[in-house]
Image (cartoon, helix red, strand yellow):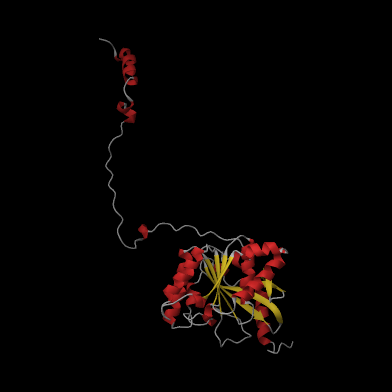
Amino acid sequence: MKKLKDCMPIINEMIQNLPPERRMENIKKAVKVETKAKKPGLWFSNFEDEPVKEPLKTSYKFLKEVSGLSEGSFNVVAGRTGKGKTDLLISLAADNLLNGYSIGFCLSEGKLSEYSSQLKYVLLERTKCRKTVEKLLDQVMGFTASSINVNSSYDYSYWVNSFYNSARFHKLNIIYLDNLSTISFTNSTPEVESGFTEALVRGASDNNVCVIAAIHPIKSLNPNVEITKDQFRGNASHVNMATNVFALNNFDNINSGLRIIKTLKSRYFGEKEGKCFELKFKKLKFRGFYKSDSPINQIQARRYFADNYRRNPSGRN
């Protein structure tokens, strides 16, 4: 009888001659794996990770500090009437255009032609080239709050859907809403106002568009005091639901050109709340614009607020 080792060459040759599907290394065992269907409902295990919102380029430090200019964010800027909110929005818009973004302006008051003229002068100041300005203005879409039809004074959902439909149709990256305080839904009952704000915030996130809205503080606010969270016009829905909230403070009693923007609230960067930035203003034919901003020491900011309150409202030192 032959020994096994003597038979191995023959066995190996037979294995090599087997078709591929009959070789052991290619035969897979059938393994029964039981999979359970996910339970219906809002179980945390059923949620998928949300995609990261992409930050947008900006040269303004107060927005960089809290990623205010990013996909899906809803930002609120509060400031007194005639103290620079519109100038700030147009300055930010000019910066957006130079960074290659498509933007929109939605106005609840004022004329689109006036915004166009001011933006044109700001861009001309920045680029020094009229042909470049003309090309950049083609990236700006304008509409008014009153041009969006509504079914009733309480049906804000139709208005909000139309607002974001325009953003999708024109492929807008950023929308500036000036002035949110004077839209009829904001001047309605607290329930309508909060629902309107919630729909705007959710729409910005769902459509990956950045919204920056300007609002007024309460009418009874002393012109010499600092704007705080408690001094917003209407109820607290703007503060509670917005991604970031900023206050644009003026100091007319000590320096009529001084403007400081302060972070009142940040959903994702709470440790940045209270930070202040001084805006550098330049006068133009059509009003002016904020060239840049720089962080300001907290002690110095408090001094400005205190001095402005103590000084005589006439502006006398």
Give the residue furthest to the left.
1
From the viewer's perspective, tell me whether residue 211 is left or right of residue 192. right
Percent position of residue 15, x then y? 32, 20
Residue at image coords 28%, 44%: 33
Total number of numbered labels? 0
Percent position of residue 276, x then y? 63, 72
59 versus 82 height, above or below: above
21 versus 260 height, above or below: above
Q: Residue 209 or 311: which is nearer the viewer? A: 209
Residue at image coords 62%, 63%: 97
Q: Residue 37 or 58: which is nearer the viewer? A: 58
Q: Residue 70 or 188: which is nearer the viewer? A: 188
Residue at image coords 62%, 75%: 113
Q: Residue 162 or 221: which is nearer the viewer? A: 162
Percent position of residue 160, x then y? 46, 72
From the viewer's perspective, tell me whether residue 18 is left or right of residue 217. left
56 versus 306 height, above or below: above
From the viewer's perspective, tell me whether residue 3 is left or right of residue 216. left
Give the residue furthest to the top.
1
Residue 119 seen in render: yes
Residue 292 seen in render: no
75 versus 315 height, above or below: above
The quarter of the rendered structure image containing the C terminus is bottom right
Res. 61 image quadrant: bottom right
The quarter of the rendered structure image containing the N terminus is top left
Percent position of residue 164, x then y? 48, 68
